[in-house]
Structure formats: structure tokens, C-alpha cells
Amino acid sequence: MRTGAAAGHEGYYHEAVCYRSDAELLAVAVPFLLGGVAAGEPTVVSFGARNEALVRAALPADAPVTFLTGGDMYARPAVAIKAYRQLLAEHVADGARQIRIIGEVPRVALGPTWDWWARYESAINQVYDEFPLWSMCAYDTRITPAPVLSDIMRTHPQVATADGRHVPSDTYTDPTAYLTETRTLPPDPLQWTEPVIELTDPTPAQARHAVYGADRGGLSIDDVEDLVVAVSETVTNALRYGRPPVRLRLWAGEDRITVTVTDGGTGPKDPFAGLVPASNGSSGGLGLWITYQSCGHVALHRGPDSFTVRLTAGNPHFTV
């Protein structure tokens, strides 16, 4: 039997917590966590170091609450989904009737990489819906930009408030509609210059060679190798499923390499592509899922007559 605001709800009960002070965060988090403990439900916190310390100090020392490392859980959206689905499945297998989780994405996620976290917040409404999960996603309005707050309201069906209310979001948008919208991406400042490499209809081998040749030694070997795999998969998908011409452009900076792959098609038909393996098992969907797990950032853009994947290795948290 489910408890609290999610009582009587089937599937995923997904709430946003938009707080303006530490006191407001604790006013929501502490009753949520203690309610889970009292009900004998698996109760989990996945915060960064600062907010984790706040919550730990506010809870009884012996409260059986699990603390995960937020930075590890939220390394990349596809990684977070994979890890959380495994965690939820384990709790259900152990007999859990409800699981409570409160978490937050890293502060840097509110910047240039927010687009794929917005996709994450939307997609999980469906991706986690097979589990009896009640989760709260915490956002500090003191540091969260207004466009991000707008996305939060559109990707969370419910909002939890510091005065104990649980209210529907007036602007919540169904994931299938939200994930297929055309979005404007903030340009990487590297793209304001001419690309160091530009290829038309490259083979995957030529694409891999281009990435290796652009490395200036500022990235780790793992970052470069992951980008090589991601670019190869993306070019393969574009050649196989897109429309010619396929154009690869590459920019190299001191702390990152940015690559765009553009074709004349409309992109994947699956709105959840990249975040989870393709439901139909197609190799193209699997390739994008692998790419989402390996790159520092992956951005998708549908234009009027083209589809572009932008891949970044190294530090994707640039300033415009």
C-alpha cells in the first residue's frame, strides 16, 4: 500500500521542489524522508555535498535513510536512468510497495548542458512509470535560470511546496510532445570560429581519424576514445538512416573538442532516443544510447530540413 501524497497512485509520482532557502528545502525533504522511514519504505537521498550535509544534520542520527553520491548518479542522463532503474528493480524485487527518492542534478547542469537534463526530466515520467516510485527533484530558485524553471514546470506533473501542499503543475507537458519539440541550443563559442576539420559524407573510419588528429593533448585518453566511439556511431547512423549529404564539422579548444554531424533527415522517430535503448532494438537507437553514455554532452537539433547531433568531449560547461 502506498503512502503520503502518492497514496492510491499507480506508477511514478514525480514532483518538483522549487525552494528559495535552506529552510524551505528542509521543510519539504525532512517530512518526506521521515514519512518513508515510518512507513518502512526504501528512502533515498541523492544530493550534492552541501545539501546532503544539511539533510543529514536535520535527520535523526539513526534514521535508515540511504545517501547516494549525487555527482556520481547524475554524471549523464542515460547513466542516471540506467542506475536508477537497476536500483528501483532491486527494491521491488525485495518487496517494496513504494520507494521514495529526493535528489538534485549538479549545479553545472543548469547551464549549457541543461537541454539533455530537461529531456531526462521529461522522459523519466514514462521510463520509471513501471515502478512504485515517489520522487522529488529539488531546484534552488536562487541559482536556477528562469528558462530552466519553466522547463521544470513542464516536465514535472506535481509540485511539492514548503507549506506541505502537493499541487499539479499547470504547464506539465506529455513527454512525447515535449521531447519532439524543436529547441534552440546555446552555441558553443568554439563554433563562432571556422571548424578545424570539415568533411562531407565521411566514412566512420575517416570520422574516427579526424577526432584522433584534432586532439591537442588537453583531454584525457578516455575522453578522446569515448568521443571517437560516439562520432563513429553518429556518422554511421547518419549514413544509414539519414539523408545525404552528411557533414561533419569539428572544433578543438584547450579543454574540449566539439563535433557536429548533420544530415538532411528528420532524426530518430523515437522521442526517447539516446536516453534509453531503442524499444524496437534497432542498432541506430542503440548507437545513440551508447553515445549518450560516453560523451560529456550530446545535443540534438531538428531544423526545417536537417538533423544535427552535437557531441562534446572534455568540458562542456562553457560560458557564452
Image (cartoon, helix red, strand yellow):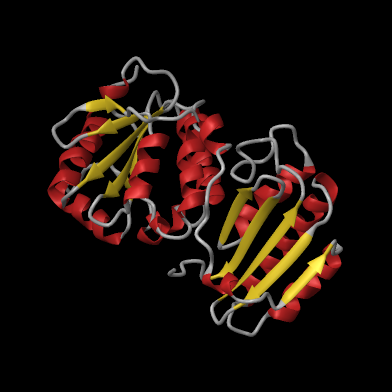
Q: Position of residue 202 (x, y in %)?
A: 84, 64
From the viewer's perspective, tell me whether residue 269 is left or right of residue 107.
right
In which quarter of the view is residue 250 placed?
bottom right
Most extreme residue toward the bottom is: 217
Q: Position of residue 211 (x, y in %)?
A: 73, 73
Inspect this view and state whether residue 148 appears. yes
Most extreme residue toward the top is: 8
What is the number of callouts on the image?
Answer: 0
**Which residue is pictured at 64% across the width and 41% down the height?**
273
Depth check: 138 or 134 in front? 138
Q: Is residue 220 above or below residue 262?
A: below
Q: Position of residue 132 (x, y in %)?
A: 43, 25
Q: Is residue 189 above or below residue 283?
A: below
Inspect this view and state whether residue 45 appears. no
Q: Is residue 107 above or below residue 222?
A: above
Depth check: 260 or 46 in front? 260
Q: Position of residue 207 (x, y in %)?
A: 79, 67
**Which residue is pictured at 25% across the width and 50% down the height?**
141
From the viewer's perspective, tell me whether residue 200 is left or right of residue 7.
right
In which quarter of the view is residue 152 placed?
top left
* Image quarter hosting the C terminus: bottom left
